Image (cartoon, helix red, strand yellow):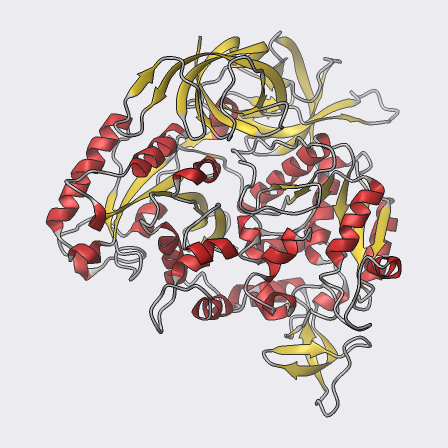
Amino acid sequence: MTQAQTKLVRVVTAGSVDDGKSTLIGRILHDSQALMSDQVDALSNARFSRAEEGDLDLSFVTDGLESEREQGITIDVAYRYFATPQTSFIVIDAPGHEQYTRNMVTGASNADVAIVLVDASRLHQGALKVQTRRHATIAHLLGLKVVFAVNKMDLVNWSQKVFLEVEESLKRLSRSLGITNAAIVPINARSGDNVVSKSPAASWYDGSSLLDILQSQGEGTDLSELPFRFSIQRVVRVDGHTIEAQRGYAGRIASGQIAIGDEVFVGPHRRPTKIVRIETYDQSLDRAEAGQSVTLYTEDEVDAARGDLLTRGEANYAKRVTADLCWLDDQVWDPRRRYIVQQGTSSILSRIENVLHIRDMRDLSEVRGDQALKLNDIALVQLQTQTPILADLFQDNPKTGAFILIDPDTNQTAAAGMIRGVA
Amino acid sequence: MTFFSRLLHLDRLESEAIYILREAAAQSRNPALLFSGGKDSAVLLHLALKAFRPEKLPFPLLHVDTGHNFEGVTQFRDETAARLGERLVVAHVEESIQRGTVRLASPTASRNAAQAVTLLEAIETHGFDLLLGGARRDEDKARAKERVFSHRDAFGAWNPKSQRPELWDLYNGRLQTGENFRVFPLSNWTELDIWTYIEREKIALPSLYFAHVRPVVRDGDYWRPVTPVTPAAEGQLVENRLVRFRTVGDMTCTCPIESNAADVSAIIAETRLSTLSERGATRMDDKVNEAAMERRKREGYF
């Protein structure tokens, strides 16, 4: 097992309907030998296949639902797993239809990199589709790296002129969103050109294949280097007869590191205590770091419960924050309503006090005013919470800067939120 | 800006599963863990111990028993629960047949699909509002579409066309009365991950996962096991072959593969080289039609 050396890259597809997202994922898996022979056989016998005789409809690798195959579209996210010698991949195929944007947001929130596809043959004077802009915006807001893939290059005879036009539009889009150094790759997902290996079809293209670009993604920031954040999932009570502390706090370390003897603060009141034991099921540890599920024991009774946070270092709590929201509920926002903020393991009532602006996806301009928030809107809002919440900014710490809003009447997840500032 | 943790592959999967198990227990009133004695549920149970010991598990184990089990599996199930001192609830398809809620075409017909009926009856009888299962997204194209917290309506049905959004690792486990969740802590594990974890953690399994000699008959691409409920047809050649099971399910639809892998490390080596998917190589119930799993899940299957 080479697991010690492999890094994990989670990739989501994005872009408009029929730009070839599912076909691309199928192609990557097929050409990386990640499909089993019975799965390939199943493709060649599939009902509703749109492939020509003797060919495979690779979109069916991830479009696994009956209604997806029948309609030839992706409805919900599919997760596939494969590994190259250097990298272990989770590929997440997301739908392109505006109607299913919330499923794309679901996929994007679990990814590190977004491949935003553009159909080279369907651009008019370089004009990108609204969904392309929407998906690039969502990927960027969620902190993903963006890679653009200009697909269906065969339909424009691998014309460098067409590619340069699209590239110019994508650079403009990147500039307006603040995306820097995004790779732009000309591909043909159906035939596999420039997908896994470089194609002679585009002799003028001197960049890498798409898969190589995904594999060479820098690793970014090590979560264990950020301030310590620990959201309590469960209080463990041990019936014992030793004099050691008997209440433990079980959870997963969101960021940072913790060692025995470290001073931590409990919740917004910043009550200090010391860590005396760090335990897992079968081990006592001296220290632990981001990603590990552990049980922490403190020096004294701190009266902490599920939902409370243990922190080290700078930790701002606030009752008013500004946040980007992706509205995911069919029901529009009701200004009179309260919504539950779920952040880590805590649930706190909140109210959206102000909609600062909503993004217009046609030109990405920020529309001011307090319009109703409706399905698929992306807005910057001012949120007031009943008690103070940890106000880590999403761009500094995505593990704690993210939250969801839940409608307490319907229990639906109404919005995905990212803290951008303290209001 | 992207972020990463330094955990190794299996450590990351393990920690994620523990986190999901704790969220499931904390956000539900009356959960249960589906435990059949199969390898995925054995891994899930092991992770549950890691999530909740030194306390007792905050849920009972639940098995939907078709009555058509391979030798040693129910014994393994019962012994495991007893060894751990955890409560085991067994819901029998046979009882649903007695009640008349399951009707079979013939007495020896497959009881695999009937499991959904018995499962839903168990949910109602015991008032379970959340079931933890060992299903993995890499098993099947319908499962590849499923959320970690999979919402089921009052009929137990999965609606793949309107699943709840699931953002980051913030699981919304809120329910209306009568609804329930199926929660899958092993969603992101592959078959190879399961076996390498079984090796690392020395997790015990029923013996039929390892190479053994068994009477089988050739049935298309499969070696179909010869059992009391699946006897050889008249004139069929019964052969004694060295085989092992890659999945363990109902006797009427689960087939072994030819293999001489007698221990976990040999199975790992074989899994790495396999050109057939786990269910494709072993499960006749998925071959009925292309969307077999999706349809079963819509009816309340896990």
Q: Position of residue B284 (x, y in %)?
A: 64, 70
Residue at 72% x, 47% y is: B46
Residue A62 position (above or below residue A321): below
Q: In which quarter of the image is the N terminus of chain B?
A: top left
Residue B213 vs A202, above or below: the answer is: below
Q: Would residue B163 be found to the left or right of residue A274 on screen? A: left
Q: Which residue is drawn at 38% across and 66% down?
A: A56
Out of B49 and B231, give the one closest to the viewer.
B231
Q: Where is residue A62 in the image (x, y as percent from the top left)?
A: 46, 54
Q: Which residue is drawn at 64% across and 24% down?
A: A409
| The quarter of the displayed image where residue A217 is located | top left
Answer whether residue A105 is visible to the viewer in this image: yes
For this rendering, which residue is in front, A164 or A235?
A164
| Side of A220 where B291 appears, left or right | right
Q: Where is residue A3 in the image (x, y as percent from the top left)?
A: 51, 50
Say whether residue A393 is left or right of residue B197.
Answer: left
- Camera-nearest residue between A187 and A271: A187
Residue B182 in picture, x, y percent from top left: 67, 43
Question: Residue extending furthest bottom?
Answer: B235
Report whether A247 appears left or right of B85. Answer: left
Kindly give the residue lying farthest to the left in the view shown.
Answer: A161
